Image (cartoon, rainbow, N blue to C red):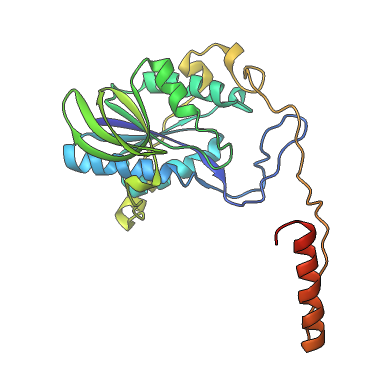
Amino acid sequence: MNIVVPIKQVPETSNVKMDPVTGTIIRDGVESIINPLDLYAIETAIQLKETYGGKVTALTMGPPAAEKALREAIAMGCDEGVLVSDRKFSGADTWSTAYVLVHAVKKLDDFDLIIAGERATDGDTGQVGPAMASALDIPLASYISRIDSVRADGMTVERLVEEGYETLEIDLPALLTVVKEISYPRLPTLRGKQKARNTELPVLTAEDLEVEEVYLGLKGSPTRVVKIETPKVTRGGTILKAVDEESMNDAIEELVEFLKTREMI
């Protein structure tokens, strides 16, 4: 079973800054890590390989520094890593990103399954995986929490929904997006780190992928952020300090009056 895992580098810090002009995330000077939700996709793919054999290829689109994420994925147990990198891809929205990744997948060996994380923690859209499935014209199963069985031509999976769980039969090749329930990501091993250090990572550019430049990067993105605002806390309040019995009684009385005015008691 040949499995492709699209992964993404995201800012490690929660203090994400946005460029107010382009509406894109400012990544310079910010430590990046593998999107935490992609780790569950990597672990799921490795477990399937260990059970059914085959190969796991990690795929990412980003600047040259994104090879760090690929080497970490290889250290965890992926067999190969492919970096899709070109300045023409800069500022791509989810549609443009999916467009490029689909062309990258087509450059790889035949695949049986694509496993992606539920969403990326920076954009938080959950759109790239489904968009890839649509462009590749393959079945999509999202929010997968368990894989029950795998056959030569299909698989049985469990999907997390608001009411509980659904059991789905899905034909292969297919694309899955997985949730945290599906696995517990392993840590990289020493042998894995040694392999990752010595693994050659091919780099695919826009020219290699033979993509249409009109669909690339910020200019080729049909969606964009038009305005960024930081929410402000406008609530006023009164601090009541109870340092002795008298001030405690006063605080209680004031709190009771406040609740009465709000018709809460």
Which quadrant of the figure contains the N terminus? top left
Q: Position of residue 178 (x, y in %)?
A: 38, 38
Would you place residue 249 above or below residue 119 in this image? below
Q: Is residue 25 left or right of residue 48?
A: right
Give the residue at x 76% y 56%.
Answer: 262
Nearer to us in this view, 177 or 260: 260
Inspect this view and state whether residue 244 appears: no
Inspect this view and state whether residue 221 appears: yes
Give the residue at x 43% y 22%.
Answer: 132
Give the residue at x 68% y 40%.
Answer: 26
Nearer to us in this view, 10 or 211: 10
Give the residue at x 59% y 18%.
Answer: 216
Q: Is residue 152 left or right of residue 44?
A: left
Q: Position of residue 17 (x, y in %)?
A: 70, 44
Q: Position of residue 120 (x, y in %)?
A: 51, 39
Nearer to us in this view, 239 or 151: 239
- Quadrant in the picture for residue 110: top left
Nearer to us in this view, 107 or 36: 36
Q: Is residue 248 left or right of residue 182?
A: right
- Quadrant in the picture for residue 165: top left
Q: What is the total number of numbered labels drawn onto the structure image?
A: 0
Which quadrant of the figure contains the C terminus? bottom right
